[in-house]
């Protein structure tokens, strides 16, 4: 049998085939179909327009109105109402609203809704996050979501895979976020267009589950269809604690084919900062120069998990954020919020002068909870720094890991934790 | 089907936030979205674009978010077709699914300027620049996608296959 990558194996299994080859068009069964308050209203409109009356499985269609939660205005409230009414009408098991709502890509793994080996489609580009669990997951539009909600299937072209091998040991303050920023800086925002990115090597193995998800989260920022890390003991432990279905653990065959293999010596890498206005516009922390900040945001589906809160708390402990800027911290889910509270992080954050936001996408997409004025500059642990992404089109967004963000909040300019 | 229109020309990596900013995503009404189409990139576009006009852009058009609001806004603004060197994959799928014609053609992009008049044959992928009299051939649309278009989009094709 043809040796296959982890991605090909998952797709073959879900297509009911023994093997698949890159370029094949396959119809695959989806385990989870996800929508949010921006994309699901259009999907629901399409669903109704063609006269559909039933979702393919009420436990597998997941709706999370996270982008503008808590509803920031009348229009966004109306959008959420469309989701809420649909969720109740179809008795969806996984609908998260109000105090249960969190950023979708942090919420689904945490609750065990997505499990290793799954095929997940989400009408949200960062659906690729679940590759961190060893699932095949990819973003789609609303019409694809509508079709999947009805049929439980979606068509894909089987992608070629690029393998990224990180050998050696990670340096201090270097996280999954930095590895992916390094890659995007090297290959560009379309460097992996249509492809699957597979991350391996001892440095990747050493990453926590949170950091793996943050790495796969940004595969889309290189144009990729998906990002994936093969499951190991850490993945198994994570899944055992929460998976609501039986996980399947896949790994790539030794002789699997890759269209490209790129190797890194992890010990040589530094924390990275992406400059405006593309995630590929990266520099090593030591080459950043003097960049004064008006706002620092720690949160999002990239870096709003408990490990990110912990690192921020560690750095901010006993310190104060610069008076020149606003520090906004957004635990990505109610679970992370509660855990941060329990561990005393909120005490540290509030004493440092931070604003603690309820779980929401908020400023990440320029929605609410911290919008920038013309000429303002923010450093964020989010994933996109496009023109106008966090507010006025003459504002700027820089991207980094949470350790750099927390240290920068104290300094008032972009700086590493070792400079404190 | 043949279309003819005047060109709006843009560079590489036009992201979905440039096509339709997140602050307008609290609605999915096509007419409303059209008013703000391309606002971040080109503030004159929405007010001046005419029915049938064509967007021509460099590589990786539509990168970023999965928001279908982006192709919806472009279509509702009256744009008949987008030609680029390449498209981000979610934007590519979305456009086919909701019926916005898109074509990939390096040469057409390099040899076309803003305001040129293009004639595009959507069935054959032939692009004619009537301003400078050059002709180009776009990459063929994969047969599977062509079937989707012929069926009238993804939802229509699902209905046709009796899956509803
Ligand atoms: S946190 Fe940001 S990137 Fe993640 S889903 Fe929300 S808006 Fe998108």
Image: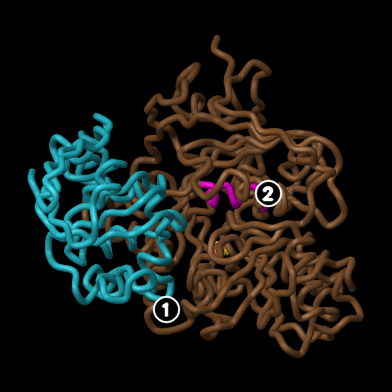
Q: Which chain is brown?
A: A
Could you tell me what secondary structure mostly forms the magenta stretch? helix
- Chain B visual colour: cyan
Task: Give the quarter of the figure containing the C terminus of chain A.
Answer: bottom right
Q: Residue at x 67, y 53 (%)?
A: A214
- Work out whether A29 lies above or below A412: above
Q: In this view of the protein, which residue sits in the foreground, B127 or A241? A: B127
Q: Nearer the viewer, mark 2 or mark 1?
A: 2
The chain ID associated with circle 2 is: A
Residue at image position (86%, 50%) is A171
Where residue A182 is drawn, which disc sits there?
A: 2
Residue under label 1, please give it. A77
x then y, percent, for residue A337 = 72, 70
Q: CA distance from mark 2 to mark 1?
A: 39 Å
Of labels 2 and 1, earlier in sequence is 1
Residue B159's quadrant in the figure?
top left
Q: Residue at x 89, y 66 (%)?
A: A418
Q: Is residue B162 magenta?
A: no
Q: Nearer the viewer, residue A212 or A98?
A: A212
> Is disc 2 in the same subunit as disc 1?
yes
Q: Is residue A333 visible?
A: no
Q: Secondary structure at mark 2?
A: helix
| Residue B92 place in picture, x, y as percent | 34, 46
Horizontal arrangement in the rendering, residue B66 relative to residue A229 (left or right): left
Span colored in magenta = A214-222
């Amino acid at each position: 049998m043809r040796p296959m990558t982890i991605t090909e194996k998952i797709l073959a299994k879900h297509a009911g085939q023994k093997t698949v080859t890159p370029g094949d068009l396959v119809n695959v069964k989806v385990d989870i179909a996800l929508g949010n308050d921006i994309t699901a209203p259009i999907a629901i409109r399409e669903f109704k327009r063609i006269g559909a009356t039933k979702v393919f499985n009420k436990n597998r269609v997941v709706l999370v109105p996270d982008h503008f939660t808590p509803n920031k205005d009348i229009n966004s409230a109306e959008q959420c109402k469309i989701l809420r009414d649909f969720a109740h009408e179809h008795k969806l098991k996984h609908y998260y609203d109000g105090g249960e709502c969190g950023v979708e890509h942090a919420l689904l793994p945490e609750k065990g809704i997505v499990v290793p080996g799954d095929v997940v489609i989400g009408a949200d580009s960062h659906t690729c996050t679940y590759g961190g669990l060893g699932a095949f997951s990819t973003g789609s539009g609303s019409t694809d979501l509508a079709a999947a909600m009805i049929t439980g299937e979606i068509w894909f072209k089987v992608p070629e895979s690029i393998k990224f091998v990180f050998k050696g040991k990670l340096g201090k303050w270097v996280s999954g976020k930095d590895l992916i920023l390094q890659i995007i800086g090297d290959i560009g925002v379309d460097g992996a267009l249509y492809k699957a990115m597979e991350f391996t090597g001892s440095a990747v193995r050493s990453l926590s589950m949170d950091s793996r998800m943050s790495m796969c989260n940004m595969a889309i920022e290189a144009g990729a269809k998906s990002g994936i890390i093969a499951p190991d003991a850490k993945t198994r432990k994570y899944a055992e604690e929460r998976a609501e279905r039986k996980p399947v653990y896949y790994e790539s065959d030794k002789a699997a084919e890759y269209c490209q293999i790129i190797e890194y010596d992890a010990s040589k890498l530094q924390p990275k900062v992406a400059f405006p206005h593309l995630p590929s516009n990266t520099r090593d922390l030591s080459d950043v120069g003097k960049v004064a900040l008006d706002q620092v945001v720690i949160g999002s589906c990239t870096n709003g998990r408990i490990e990110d809160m912990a690192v921020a708390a560690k750095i901010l402990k006993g310190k104060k954020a610069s008076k020149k800027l606003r520090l906004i911290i957004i635990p990505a889910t109610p679970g992370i919020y509660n855990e941060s509270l329990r561990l005393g992080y909120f005490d540290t954050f509030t004493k440092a002068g931070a604003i603690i936001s309820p779980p929401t996408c908020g400023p990440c997409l320029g929605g609410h909870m911290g919008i920038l004025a013309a000429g303002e500059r923010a450093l964020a642990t989010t994933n996109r720094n496009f023109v106008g992404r966090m507010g006025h089109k003459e504002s700027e967004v820089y991207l980094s890991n949470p350790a750099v963000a927390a240290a920068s909040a104290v300094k008032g300019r972009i700086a590493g934790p070792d400079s404190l | 089907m043949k279309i003819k229109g005047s060109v709006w020309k843009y560079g590489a990596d036009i992201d979905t936030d440039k096509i339709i900013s997140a602050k307008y995503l609290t609605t999915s009404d096509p007419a409303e979205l059209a008013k703000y189409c391309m606002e971040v990139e080109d503030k004159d576009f929405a007010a001046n674009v005419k029915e049938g006009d064509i967007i021509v852009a460099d590589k990786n058009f539509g990168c970023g978010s999965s928001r279908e609001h982006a192709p919806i806004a472009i279509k509702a603004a009256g744009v008949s077709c987008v030609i680029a060197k390449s498209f981000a994959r979610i934007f590519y799928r979305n456009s086919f699914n909701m019926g916005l014609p898109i074509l990939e053609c390096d040469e057409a992009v390099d040899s076309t300027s803003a305001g040129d008049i293009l004639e595009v044959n959507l069935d054959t992928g032939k692009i004619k620049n009537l301003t400078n009299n050059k002709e180009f051939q776009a990459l063929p649309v994969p047969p599977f996608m062509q079937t989707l278009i012929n069926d009238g989009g993804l939802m229509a094709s699902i209905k046709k296959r009796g899956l509803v």
